[in-house]
Image (cartoon, rainbow, N blue to C red):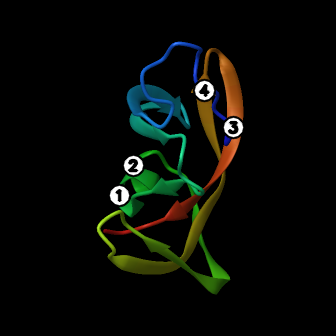
Amino acid sequence: MFCLKAEEGSEDPHAVVSAMFPMNSLPTKVLFDASATDSFINPATAKQIACAVEEIDVHICASTPIGSVYQTDRVVRNCPIMIQNRVLFVDLIVWDI
């Protein structure tokens, strides 16, 4: 999930890709960024796809490319996403921006 390899001859190995994938069986727009270090989900999307949001004991800080910093103490654990007929379970940081 966190290791993406650019195909030889592709224009930009750091390109962001957007597509629809089933998450918890519901079609969901997903953004893949090969240079990102973490995976995030909006709280409204987590609610819509019926993934349980839990609080954790630490605050996670993340910054945007323009320098804004946001923090959260909520995650979704083991959220199922289907890619090429394989179900993968991902942990997502709940980020309300």
Place of residue 40 in the rendered image (x, y in percent of width and height, measured from the top left) = 50, 56
Q: Residue type at mark 2?
A: Gln
Q: Position of residue 33 (x, y in %)?
A: 48, 42
Q: Quadrant of the N terminus?
A: top right
The residue nearer to you, when weighing 59 against 35, is 35
- Whole-number angstrom distance, CA of label 2 to CA of label 1: 6 Å
For the residues carrying marks 1 and 3, which lies nearer the camera in this image?
A: 3
Q: Earlier in the sequence, mark 2 or mark 4?
A: 2
Image vertical order of residue 60 relative to residue 76, above or below: below
* Real-space Cα separation, disc 4 to disc 3, in angstroms: 16 Å
Determine which of the numbered discs, if any, sits on residue 3 in the image.
3
| Left or right side of 34 for 28 | left
Task: Name the amino acid, label 3.
Answer: Cys
Q: Residue at x 37, y 66 (%)?
A: 64
- Image point 66% across, 47% down: which residue? 90
Residue of label 2: 48
What amino acid is found at the position of numbered circle 4 in the picture? Met
- Report the Cα–Cα distance between label 2 and label 3: 27 Å
Instruction: Name the residue that disc number 4 marks.
Output: 82
Q: Which residue is mark 1?
A: 44
Q: Sequence-wise, which precedes: disc 2 or disc 3?
A: 3
Of the two numbered discs 4 and 3 on the same chain, state the one appearing first in sequence: 3
Circles 2 and 4 in contact, beta carbons < 8 Å: no
The residue lying at 56 percent from left, 37 percent from top is: 24
